[in-house]
């Protein structure tokens, strides 16, 4: 992606803090995220459970209102901060952004037929006649490799993979430009997972979509993403082009994460970097670099100072890392 | 497979009965679990992986039973014991379950009782099977928690499951399974609910147990990555049958059955980037109440012939221990 890239969404210092009942503490689910999503790309968002991936996805769509920062979306008539828009004004944004949820079972109403589930958003956005709605829904079902007639069936009549494809079709109803896929393939069997991943790639090409693809599965993220952002405890640790990140990760957390994945190749022997213990509680964030409690390269400075996001240009591409020792990692890479 | 087997499963058939219908969940499965080796069972959901493990443990639900075949436990002290003939809740089965054969379940939250302290639950197993005092049992529990790498074990031993994180709960469940140094450990998707970094910790733990105690491990998984990392031997299951088996190298390096190959082709492999092609397996697993007549994989297979539609292929040994059940494996192009 060397040509000029137009940002579609810019997050600046985005924060989502949840108050805890009966206590003074706050859960800092998303704690100051700067992120640019470019038109036409797939941005992978990866991290362990509880790191705030899903919250970030929902906060982007304003399904959870962020408690701080800006979320600027490039509408056709110029950029606007989503956080400043009222719920009513957000209708305009909903037309541009949609979400595909993890669990296709619970995201479809079991007492509605597929057509009923899919027809409401169309009604809201001005498609009045029923024939027209049936045509749109039918066309979309065909686009996700399902039969038109399926629209009069109920969700229970479909398998997990089919339901997820319906979920995708529903997200496409009003021709959005940006789709957040929140663990869209995690609940599926491996053989079905491939089907949905390939479908997402096909749709992206045909419609020029932009995806934010949230997953904890690094192999899936690598397969589908152009750029990857690694999250840990509400902050982004590293962002780079997918191949750069997988070949030359700079952050110790990314390295550990990559080394922990079992690879389906029996001749592939690698050294596992074992991370001690669990992710700390987001209510009781470690001081300094939030990864320092589990980091093998932890030094005094890591305990005291929060590392800033630094940008390196490697082979003409941006590689951003938040680590006190990223300069060293960069030098090591240059020497090699 | 070489070495000394500790559990032999021969032609196991476990059927489920409901609404006057019969689901042949496990339909003629044979394999051996050997001392000091890890046997991985792979397959999609509903292929009978977990039912196989529950059959060995005699933990099958009420409406199911072992219809045919036998499961033999080769005990070092008591000789051969036919597990499938023992009463489910009889004295003999109860004295083996948790002591000689232990199991780790997928979801640690449902495997632990929420209203008892974790330490007590581990202790219970030791007290049940061994002639020790409460103090000794508590001390051993504490040692186990330390061995499992649970932080602050003195405090954690008296905490309830909800106070543990997911990874710690699973480690507590493993501690419980390991408390009487079992000869066989059945692990039913032990890390599916956990993050990769925690998964790596659990695997490290299982490997060290295998080395130190020469434990035989049956590891159920659907993740081919886990198989290549952990397995010595592999069996691939589809619709209640073993369709391919052998050592990990034989099966993963040289997969022969179209299903194994399709399964391997459907997962993205780390490090291969966006260039790789992944191919979904077409169609769906058939309804267990309405199975294909011949080979169970025939409707989804690219290489099927008329024979496949008529009869289920028998077992064929390729070389060494590599077994495949496919009529047409010779026609499948090799790379």
Image (tube, coloured by chain):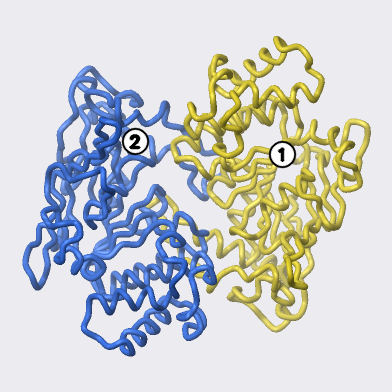
Q: Which residue is mark 2?
A: B335
Which chain: yellow? Answer: A
* Residue B45: x %, y % from top left: 38, 41
- Foreground: B188 or B163? B163
Residue B160 higher or lower than A81, as above or below: below
Q: Nearer the viewer, mark 2 or mark 1?
A: 1
Within 10 angstroms of label 1, few (less than 14), some, or many (20 or more) residues? many
Q: Chain of mark 1?
A: A
* Residue B249: x %, y % from top left: 29, 51
Q: Which mark is residue B111?
A: none
Q: Is residue B83 left or right of residue A262?
A: left
Quadrant (top left, top right, bottom left, bottom right) of the N terminus of chain A: top right
Task: Provide the secondary structure element on which disc 2 rests.
Answer: loop
Task: Provide the secondary structure element on which disc 1 rests.
Answer: loop
Residue B264 higher or lower than B326, as above or below: below
> What is the spatial separation of the Cα atoms under label 2 and label 1, in whole angstroms?
34 Å
Residue at (54% x, 37% y) in the render: A105
Residue B81 higher or lower than A97, as above or below: below
Residue at (22% x, 29% y) in the render: B330
Q: Which residue is mark 1?
A: A41
- Foreground: B25 or B323? B25
Q: Quadrant of residue B19?
A: top left
* Residue B269: x %, y % from top left: 48, 46
- Tell me if residue B198 can be seen: yes
């Amino acid at each position: 992606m060397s040509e000029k890239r137009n940002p579609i969404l810019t997050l600046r210092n985005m924060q989502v803090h949840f108050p805890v009942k009966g206590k003074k503490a706050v859960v800092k689910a998303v704690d100051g995220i700067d992120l640019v999503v470019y038109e036409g790309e797939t941005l992978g968002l990866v991290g362990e459970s509880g790191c705030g991936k899903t919250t970030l996805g929902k906060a982007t769509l304003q399904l959870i209102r962020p408690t701080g920062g800006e979320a600027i979306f490039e509408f056709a008539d110029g950029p606007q901060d989503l956080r400043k828009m009222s719920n009513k004004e957000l209708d305009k944004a909903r037309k541009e952004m949609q979400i595909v949820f993890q669990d296709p079972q619970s995201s479809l109403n079991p007492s509605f037929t597929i057509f009923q589930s899919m027809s409401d958003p169309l009604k809201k956005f001005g498609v009045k006649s029923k024939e027209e709605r049936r045509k749109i829904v039918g066309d979309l079902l065909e686009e996700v490799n399902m039969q038109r007639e399926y629209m009069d069936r109920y969700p229970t009549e479909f398998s997990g993979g089919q339901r997820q494809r319906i979920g995708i079709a529903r997200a496409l109803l009003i021709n959005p430009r940006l789709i957040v896929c929140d663990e869209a393939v995690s609940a599926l069997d491996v053989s079905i997972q491939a089907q949905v991943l390939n479908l997402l790639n096909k749709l992206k090409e045909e419609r020029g979509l932009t995806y934010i693809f949230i997953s904890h599965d690094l192999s899936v993220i690598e397969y589908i993403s152009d750029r990857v952002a690694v999250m840990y405890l509400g902050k982004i640790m590293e962002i780079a082009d997918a191949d750069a990140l997988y070949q030359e990760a700079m952050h110790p957390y990314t390295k550990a994460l990559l080394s922990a994945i079992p690879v389906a190749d029996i001749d592939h022997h690698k050294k596992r970097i074992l991370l001690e213990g669990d992710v700390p509680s987001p209510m009781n964030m470690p001081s300094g670099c939030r990864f320092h409690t589990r980091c093998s390269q932890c030094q005094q400075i890591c305990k005291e100072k929060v590392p800033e996001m630094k940008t390196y240009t490697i082979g003409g591409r941006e590689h951003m890392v938040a680590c006190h020792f990223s300069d060293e990692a960069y030098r090591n890479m240059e020497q090699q | 497979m070489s070495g000394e087997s500790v559990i032999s499963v021969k032609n196991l058939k476990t059927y489920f009965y409901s609404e006057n219908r019969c689901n042949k969940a496990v339909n003629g499965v044979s394999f051996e679990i050997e001392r000091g080796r890890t046997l991985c069972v792979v397959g999609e959901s509903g292929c009978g992986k977990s039912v196989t493990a529950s059959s060995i443990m005699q933990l099958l639900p009420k409406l199911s039973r072992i219809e045919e075949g036998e499961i033999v436990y080769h005990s070092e002290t008591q000789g051969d014991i036919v597990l499938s003939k023992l009463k489910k809740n009889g004295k003999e089965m109860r004295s083996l379950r948790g002591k000689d054969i232990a199991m780790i379940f997928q979801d640690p939250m449902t495997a632990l009782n929420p209203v008892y302290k974790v330490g007590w639950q581990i202790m219970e197993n030791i007290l049940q099977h061994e002639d020790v005092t409460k103090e000794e049992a508590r001390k051993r529990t504490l040692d186990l928690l330390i061995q499992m790498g649970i932080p602050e074990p003195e405090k954690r031993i008296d905490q309830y499951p909800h106070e543990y994180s997911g990874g710690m709960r699973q480690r507590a469940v493993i501690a419980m399974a390991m408390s009487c140094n079992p000869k066989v450990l059945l692990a039913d998707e032990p890390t599916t609910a956990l993050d990769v970094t925690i998964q790596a910790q659990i695997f490290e733990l299982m490997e060290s147990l295998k080395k130190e105690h020469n434990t035989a491990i049956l590891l159920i998984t659907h993740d081919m990555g886990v198989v290549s990392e952990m397995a010595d031997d592999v069996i691939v299951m589809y619709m209640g049958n073993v369709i391919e088996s052998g050592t990990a190298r034989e099966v993963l390096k040289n997969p022969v059955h179209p299903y194994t190959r399709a399964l391997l082709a459907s997962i993205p492999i780390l490090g291969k980037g966006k260039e790789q092609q992944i191919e979904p397996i077409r169609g769906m697993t058939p309804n267990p109440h309405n199975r294909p007549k011949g080979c169970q994989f025939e409707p989804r297979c690219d290489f099927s012939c008329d024979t496949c539609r008529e009869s289920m292929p028998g077992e064929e040994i390729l070389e060494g221990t590599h077994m495949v059940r496919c009529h047409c494996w010779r026609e499948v192009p090799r790379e």
